[in-house]
Amino acid sequence: MSKVYFNGKVFSEDKVPVTYKSRAFRYGDGMFETIRIINGKPIFIENHIQRILKGLSTLQITSPDILEFEKLNAILADLAQNNGITKGGFARLIVWRESEGRYMPESDNSSCLIEVVPYPNNLFVLSKSGKSIDIYQDLRKQVNIIGQFKSLNSQLNVMAAVHARNKGVDDNLICNEEGLIIETTNSNVFIVSNGTLYTPPLSDGCVGGTMRMNVINAALELKLNVYESSLNQHHLLMANEILLTNAIQGIDWVNAFKHKRYYSNTALKLVDQLNKTALNL
């Protein structure tokens, strides 16, 4: 039975004292982060801490005291060891408002749950096949103050993923209210045109992905030009590559969008650079 951290104690996963009364369950009133583990150790923790602290401040939820590098690193490493994870894995850290009340909470105190599970690859690995994608048109994402964070309210992402499944593609692109492409159901988006990377700015409404930041840094290490630029369907059809980035997978690549087929040369170079960075942390 897996071990899970909850509010200062470690429980077997079937003994965690979280009930249906939780505001995480009732209202999606909280944030989450997914943190990659390599060689049994969490990576890029500082990036995740910065984002969730900013998100919790935006939601006016009191931050738990474990959101400091030394404390969180120790908890994650201990959970990985307790769950027998010595190579690849990932952690899911969830923080929500723990309070009585309905839409108006009686307090802004928080609860925190962390689970650590194995992942089949130790290092970041670029898939051989790539993904097919389409654009989800039924709902659009609002550009607002919580859109750049990973909220527990993820209904749009779920609906876009269900639509992708029903259409027989691997993932769907999500657009903002102006119809600009900003992300997929679980990843930030980059395109490569003539050796230059382009990715939507946060002002367009995409999640401020921790891997997005690290891919930008990896590209700069490789002396590649990177620009924040709004994207539409025309840009994707003119691109040489489309990259999808998230904290767990690292980088994936798109093999097909509409009638267009793509390459993965830049993606492969970036994965190698990410692994070099991660192993030196």
Image (cartoon, helix red, strand yellow):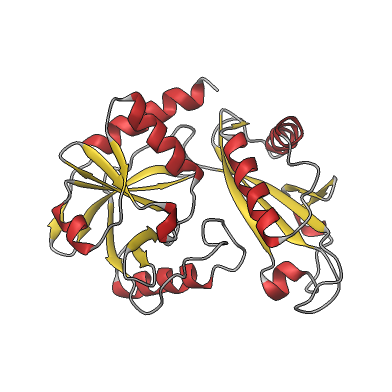
The relative height of residue 63 versus residue 216 in the rendered view (above or below) is: below
Residue at the image point whose x is 86% and y is 73% from the top: 100
Residue 119: x, y in percent?
A: 53, 42
User: Left of 29 or right of it: where is 198?
Assistant: left
Residue at the image point whose x is 48% and y is 72% from the top: 156
The relative height of residue 27 versus residue 233 in the rendered view (above or below) is: below
The C terminus, quarter of image? top right
Q: Nearer the viewer, residue 137 or 130?
A: 137
Residue 112: x, y in percent?
A: 76, 53
The relative height of residue 89 versus residue 61 in the rendered view (above or below) is: above
Residue 251: x, y in percent?
A: 37, 42
Q: For residue 186, which quarter of the picture?
A: bottom left
User: Left of 78 or right of it: where is 153?
Assistant: left
Q: For residue 94, which quarter of the picture?
A: bottom right
Residue 178: x, y in percent?
A: 34, 71
Residue at the image point whose x is 71% and y is 67% from the top: 24
Q: How many marks?
A: 0
Q: Nearer the viewer, residue 159 or 203?
A: 203
Residue at the image point whose x is 63% and y is 35% from the top: 85
User: Left of 71 or right of it: where is 147?
Assistant: left
Q: For residue 176, which quarter of the picture?
A: bottom left
